[in-house]
Amino acid sequence: MATKKIRVVVVDDSALVRSLLTEIINRQPDMVCVGAANDPLVAREMIRELDPDVITLDVEMPRMDGIDFLGRLMRLRPMPVVMISTLTDKGAEVTMRALELGAVDFVAKPRIGLANGLNELASQIVDKVRVAAVAKFRRPPVPVAAAPGIAQTAPRPANTLIGRISTEKMICIGASTGGTEAVKEILVHMPADSPAIVITQHMPPGFTTSFAARLNGLCQITVKEAAHGERILPGHAYIAPGGKQFRVDRSGANYVAVVEDTEPVNRHKPSVEVLFLSAAAVVGRNAYGIMLTGMGNDGARAMREMRDKGSYNFVQDEASCVVFGMPREAIAHGAADEVLPLDKIAGALLAKLGASGDRLHNRI
């Protein structure tokens, strides 16, 4: 019996891009492009008629831009969407909005050499379509316009931490597909005197700056891209720059950021494995690990190494994950102390940080 193919509709105002994406999709034995639309109004009818499993959607289009269309789609007929983004500051900002609205993932198309560039990205494109086809997607909990109010309306956590603990503790977060919203859910609940937070979110160059800026506008802590050699401070979150590896090190009594243009690890750059292994070596029992939604197994082995060195680790549960790949692997490696729904992790972390027995990770 033949396996059911993933049915894809391509929405892009460029005839060249539509043709290239159609060809890339149709080359795969497990998927088929059932339609290609040049604008969202045509796409709307095509989606009604063809009932695709996944759509690829250009960010910038005439008549109705991709964001407006995505917002309507997620309200009226939620379905998996992979955004095709432009590698510009505006494109990055719009892509962050698309992920807030419920897009599963995105691909950054090159600004020049489009045909060659898209063909070089072919494996990434089809991988993301495959992931989207099995991902969980939900309507966004609030309209995008209301997003800036999150930091004000979220319950302000009790400031139970003290400086002595804050300066030596470190929270380490790894995430991939679906992770931009999951990371936000953790960070908006962290108090201003939180221990330092270091984050690896799988993301290409050019997008992490916008990601950090959006989070910085929502959070009580300061959120920024990590810069090589800077001191890692309490009350701050540092995001691995896209296309670089990020790890932590010590300089005397201080933690410092190391940002390097080295090889991919587990096919990723940045890689959660790199960050978590450095936390195991440098931070040890003062670390807290958090593994969030994502495809694959990046960071699972290293998270177990963190736990073996005394860290306390939280892993997102299957029901709240967009993709239960990285969390599943972390659990399988014995890396989890607690497996929790996304909306419970920040509270559990703060309770653990504030507990008088915080330093003693007694395990049965």
Image: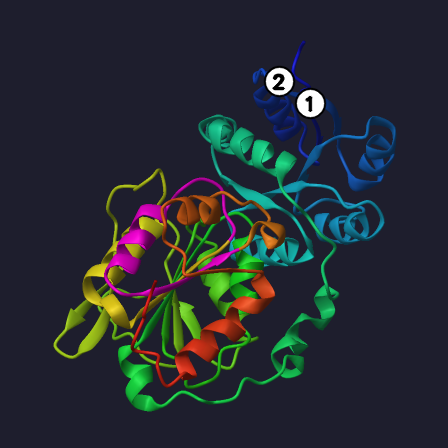
Please state which amino acid type lies under the numbered disc 1.
Cys
Please state which amino acid type lies under the numbered disc 2.
Asn
In-front residue for pair 242/270: 270
Specify few, some or many for label 2: CA neighbours under 10 Å numbering under 14, 14-19, or 20 or more. Answer: some
| Screen quadrant of the N terminus | top right
Q: Are marks 2 and 1 in contact (CB under 8 Å)?
A: yes
| Screen quadrant of the C terminus | bottom left
Q: Label 2 vs label 1: CA separation?
A: 6 Å
Identify the residue position indicated by label 1 in the image.
Answer: 33
Residue 296 among magenta residues: yes
Please report whichever mark, 2 or 1, sits nearer to the chain's N-terminal start. 2
Residue at the image point whose x is 37% and y is 86% from the top: 356
Measuring from the top left, give residue 112's x and y in whole percent: 48, 37
Residue interval drawn in magenta: 293-316
Identify the residue position indicated by label 2 in the image.
Answer: 26
Residue 223 among magenta residues: no
In-front residue for pair 290/334: 334
Tell me if residue 117 comes above or below residue 2 in the rendering: below
In-front residue for pair 203/86: 203
At mark 2, the secondary structure is helix
Specify few, some or many for label 1: CA neighbours under 10 Å numbering under 14, 14-19, or 20 or more. Answer: many
Measuring from the top left, give residue 284's x and y in whole percent: 23, 66
